[in-house]
């Protein structure tokens, strides 16, 4: 079994065990942009969120994330702080300062110790440390989606 197969199986089992987020979130118009330079993290988050009824657009760099956020107007963005090129902190700053994207909830993911402080100071709507638990991702996504009109 490959790493991706194991990740897919784990995410599918998690979604099956816990159920979907909420009927209104299952609307196919609900899109999440997953921004991470790690293939494994993108794959895990993509499988988990797709299993929850979201359409997922995986992106591996900050500039692509900014372009896609403006074009797709996602319901949510997960954003790694350490990215090639433009780092996640700068991406978050730009998202929150742009009137066209400032209302999109952003979950920051990072293995840095002071991530909570950095995320809050830049306007993140949620912060998760790496490595993260799938249940923590689901809980935070559910919480943020309840606030989305």
Image (tube, grey):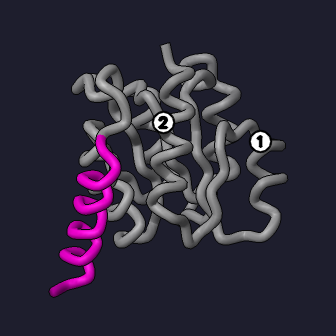
Q: Nearer the viewer, mark 2 or mark 1?
A: 2
Percent position (x, y) of residue 30? 33, 27
Q: Magenta span covers which residues? A: 1-19
Residue 3 in the image: above or below residue 94: below
Of helix, strand and loop, which one carries label 2?
Answer: helix
Picture coordinates of residue 16 (x, y %)?
24, 53
Quarter of the image where one finds residue 2? bottom left
Left or right: residue 141 versus residue 22 is right
Please, is residue 5 above or below residue 79 in the view? below
Q: Who's the residue at 38% across and 57% down the image?
A: 45
Q: On the image, numbered disc 1 is attached to which residue?
A: 122
40, above or below 23, in the image: below
Most distant residue in the front direction = 17
Q: Position of residue 90 (x, y in %)?
A: 68, 48
Q: Which residue lies furthest to the top in this view?
A: 149
Near mark 2 (Cα within 10 A), the count class, few <14, some 14-19 or many ≥20, is: some
Residue that appears at 46% across and 53% down: 35
Quadrant of the rendered image containing residue 6:
bottom left
Q: Is residue 50 left or right of residue 34?
A: left
Determine whether, in the image, residue 88 is placed left or right of residue 29: right
Dot label at residue 80: none
Q: Residues within 10 Å of mark 1 (few under 14, many from 20)?
A: some
The residue to which callout 2 is attached is: 142
Residue 45 can be seen, yes or no: yes
Query: Is residue 81 in view from this perspective?
Result: no
Image coordinates of residue 96 in percent, x first then y, are 67, 30
Picture mark count = 2
């Amino acid at each position: 079994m490959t790493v991706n197969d194991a990740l897919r199986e784990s995410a599918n089992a998690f979604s099956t065990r816990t159920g979907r987020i909420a009927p209104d979130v299952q609307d196919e118009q609900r899109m999440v942009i997953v921004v991470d330079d790690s293939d494994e993290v993108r794959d895990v988050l993509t499988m988990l969120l797709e299993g929850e009824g979201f359409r997922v657009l995986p992106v591996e760099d900050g500039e692509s994330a900014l372009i896609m956020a403006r074009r797709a107007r996602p319901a949510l963005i997960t954003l790694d702080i350490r990215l090639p090129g433009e780092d996640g902190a700068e991406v978050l700053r730009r998202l929150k300062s742009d009137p066209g994207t400032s209302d999109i909830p952003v979950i920051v993911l990072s293995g840095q110790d002071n991530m909570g402080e950095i995320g809050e100071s830049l306007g993140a709507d949620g912060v998760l440390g790496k490595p993260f638990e799938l249940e923590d991702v689901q809980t935070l996504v559910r919480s943020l989606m309840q606030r989305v009109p």
